Amino acid sequence: RALQMEFGMMGSSIWPRHLLLAAMAGRAASDVIGDVGSFEGGSGEPIELCHAQLDWVDADASCAAFLNVGLNCTSTWTEVCSTDHPLGSDYNDAPLSASGCSQCATTCSGPHLSTAEQLCERWLDDGHACNSTWATVCGTGHPLGDNFSDAPLSDYGCSQCGGNTTCSGPHVYNPEQLCERWLAEGETCDSTWLEACGSDHPGGSQYNEWPLGLNGCSPCQGDYTTCVGAYSLITELETKCPRGCEDCEDGNCDNPCADDQPERTAATCGTDECGDYLASVTDEDLSTAVEVGYPSCVNSTALSSVASYGSMGTFYLNQYYRSVARECELSDRLALSTDIDYTTCVGAYSL
């Protein structure tokens, strides 16, 4: 996931995320980084490469520019051009094959391939087997982390090596795809890797007890009968109605509020996204979470402490949502009722 955040992933290219987003929006790379043709060329360098008016985000196009002037997949920008690479100096000494273009694709290049099918097709075409690993074939650490170095190709869940199952394909970074696979296999949003697979998670044992829903997929966010779904009433509110600072008494937090500074203001959370979320949560949702979802957290290793929310009744959540809506100046969007249940301990205490 860290690699996905640092680098955009699209097709067979690895380039900085802001450039990929620009390309997706229909903007050329030159709109973001300047006119690549404006560089002053050095003596003897190939003008059609070093001064090319190219969309350098397109890996295949950039590789073609190199290969068309007689270079190869191990060539680097600084070998032939006197300026920095159009995408930045970080790319000056990277071999052409590192771009992941189809012309230079090999077994050990392009681990960023967007699908398991493409990855398996490449490896099998190169003569490797479904039990082959990155470490044995490439002899280096996996680009996505050492946790993936010893995972066999079959773990990627491609159809060529047994298909997608609950315990294969830990490389699926898209939460929606991951949840879709697990839920289709009969697992629940509260299922953990250890429960379903009986072994350590390929990403490390620290993920063994993480419920599926903590990946953030949409099917698990609104099911308040589950522990993860109930927990999302807190996490989703924090995400969609963000704080501008943190109110921590000891000051031991990342972004402490100044004296008399509210955590939220209309400037930080008075948005349509926050308002729409406040309007989507009903009294029935809170009741379901308190009566069913939160109590089930007692069985979750990762979220056992969340079970205590169930004993607080709906009043606590109701008032918390109201305070957030008030600070964000979105009280008119709140769907929750103003009625207080004085038959509960917390409701009676509010008197």
Image (cartoon, rainbow, N blue to C red):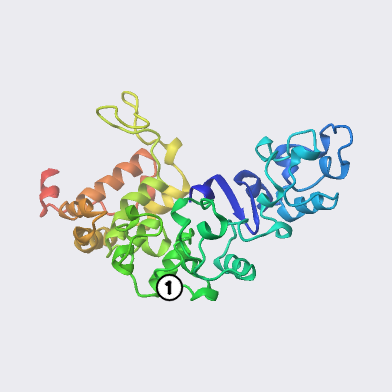
Task: Name the residue located 52 percent from the left edge and 71 percent from the top edge.
Answer: 130
Residue 296 or residue 349, whichever sits in front: 296
> Residue at 32% across / 54% down in the picture?
233
Estimate the x, y position of residue 158 in percent, counting from the top left: 52, 71
The amino acid sitting under disc 1 is Thr
Determine the image quadrant of residue 192. Answer: bottom left
Q: Quadrant of residue 259?
A: top left
Number of labelled discs? Answer: 1
Percent across and percent down for residue 126 are: 64, 67
Give percent across and percent down for residue 326. 34, 41
Name the residue carrying label 1: 165
Who is closer to the viewer here, 100 or 220?
100
Whether residue 264 sits left or right of residue 101 in the image: it is left
Residue 282 appears in the picture as rendered = no
Quarter of the image with the C terminus in it = top left
Q: In this view, does 165 lie to the left or right of 61?
A: left
* Other-residue count near label 1 (Cα within 10 Å), few / some / many at <14 / 14–19 / ≥20: some
Say whether residue 216 is left or right of residue 103: left
Lateral position of residue 277 relative to residue 125, left or right: left
Establish if 323 lies above or below 220: above
Residue 125 visible in this rendered orientation of the protein? yes
From the top left corner, tell me how far across and down residue 150 is, in percent. Answer: 46, 59
The answer to which of 64 and 95 lies nearer the viewer is 95
Q: In this view of the protein, which residue sits in the foreground, 229 or 210?
A: 210
Does 234 sit above or below residue 229? Answer: above
Check disc 1 and report its element: helix, strand or loop: loop
Residue 24 versus residue 180 in the image, above or below: above
Q: Residue at x 30, y 42 (%)?
A: 323
Q: In this view, does 261 lie above or below 21?
A: above
> Which residue is pictured at 34% across the width and 31% down the height?
262
